Amino acid sequence: MQQSKLALTSAVLLALGTTAISAQAAELSISGQVSRAIIIPDDAAGTNIQHVDNNVSGTRFRFKAKQDIGSDMQMGMRYEMQIQNNKGNKVNGGTTSNTGNAFDVRYSDIYLSGGFGKISIGKGDGAANGSTEEDFSGTYMPAAANMMDVLGGIEYEPGKRMDSVYNMYDAYSRNNRLRYDSPKFSGFSLAASSAEGDATELALRYSGKFGDTKVKAALFTAAAGDSSRKDTSGGSVSVLLGMGFNATVAFSTEDAATGSDPSVVWTKLGYRTGKHSFSVDFGTTKDRGPGDADTAGVAYTIRPAKGIEVYASYRQFTVDTANSVDPTLFMLGSRFKF
């Protein structure tokens, strides 16, 4: 009976959101977020309002644990599940029904860290994942470099999606891999990984501060290894001045099997003050589809409390084809972290 009561008490504590408990001397934390948005599009499919999960950073929960093992080393684990309803990149102005639920095991890995750096095995970020997403603007959710994660289904012509002509070529995201991260040296760090299908990734990152100015940057190259992927390379750099003004540039290219290599360049200018963040961005993709594509957008985010953000953005796409309607859209959303 006592054991049953103890088990029930533990379950109730977890359900109430306990964020740190001790289990066999390991530190365990539970966290996650809910991420929702309303998209009001005007595209080739229609003008139906869409209620979506913002796939730029979707709804998810995670368990993380770590434990010292001696000799200044630590072992840890991360298990993270993404559970989304009506993903943003699955809809357009003509969608009239919920696209259903999407489940994804984002992380299931174990790491060993120490003075030598960090070694990770299992499913998780490849070494170069996110290298095109360094961004000090504070408007990541409504205006990310990887905006096709939430807007990819918008149509510039009937049946033709925006992500077929506009995209940021980042590395290979989360996969089953062996990854090594070096310690930081004067702000620089190196990461390398080898994944299923013989895919390899290499990334050089920098994070530093010069007086009141902050800088972070990344450069990467990713070799596909098999026909399921393509070789990509690129990077990003973001600078934040002490007065709140910031600037970001991201660029990438993909190794096409024939013809010209498609490429994208994206820039963002922003201003942060207190709880408020503002930005304007411009992007252009060359040689990805039947016509080049451009985008321009303005975004605003407010953070009324820690872990909570509310945002809005307006965006226009221009596609260099004879029949493109040049879609526009307004997005309003919020992310609540716990």
Image (cartoon, rainbow, N blue to C red):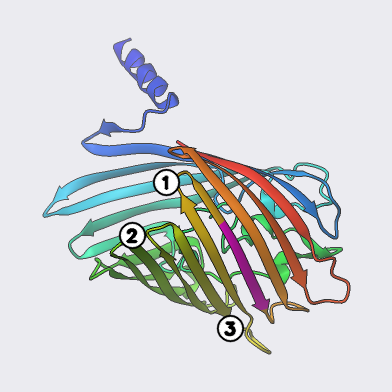
Question: Looking at the image, is mark 1 or mark 3 earlier in the sequence?
Answer: 1
**Does the rendering let one see residue 201?**
no
Distance from disc 1 to disc 2, alpha carbons, whole Å, reads: 13 Å
**Tag nearer the camera, 1 or 3:** 3
**Is 280 covered by the magenta stretch?**
yes
* Residue 100 placement (x, y as % from top left): 71, 42
Q: Residues within 10 Å of mark 2 (few under 14, many from 20)?
A: many
Residue 132 lies, with reference to residue 271, above or below; the image says: below
* Residue 161 placement (x, y as % from top left): 76, 64
Q: Which mark is residue 120?
A: 2
Residue 142 lies, with reference to residue 5, above or below; the image says: below
Whether tag 1 and tag 3 are in contact, CB under 8 A, the answer is no
**Residue position marked by numbered label 3 in the rendering:** 255
* Image mark count: 3
What residue do we see at 46% from left, 63% from top?
246
Give the residue type that dot 3 points to.
Asp
Q: Is residue 90 left or right of residue 217?
A: right
What residue do we see at 57% from left, 64% from top?
145
Residue 330 lies, with reference to residue 326, above or below; the image says: above
What residue do we see at 52% from left, 60% from top?
270
Distance from disc 1 to disc 3, alpha carbons, whole Å, reads: 33 Å
Instruction: Indicate the quadrant where residue 148 lies.
Output: bottom right
* Residue 224 placement (x, y as % from top left): 52, 77
Q: Residues within 10 Å of mark 1 (few under 14, many from 20)?
A: some
Give the residue type that dot 1 points to.
Tyr
What residue do we see at 46% from left, 61% from top?
245
Whether tag 2 and tag 3 are in contact, CB under 8 A, the answer is no
Q: Find the magenta span and give its range.
A: 279-285
**Residue position marked by numbered label 1 in the rendering:** 79
Label 1: element kind: strand
Q: Quadrant of the N terminus?
A: top left
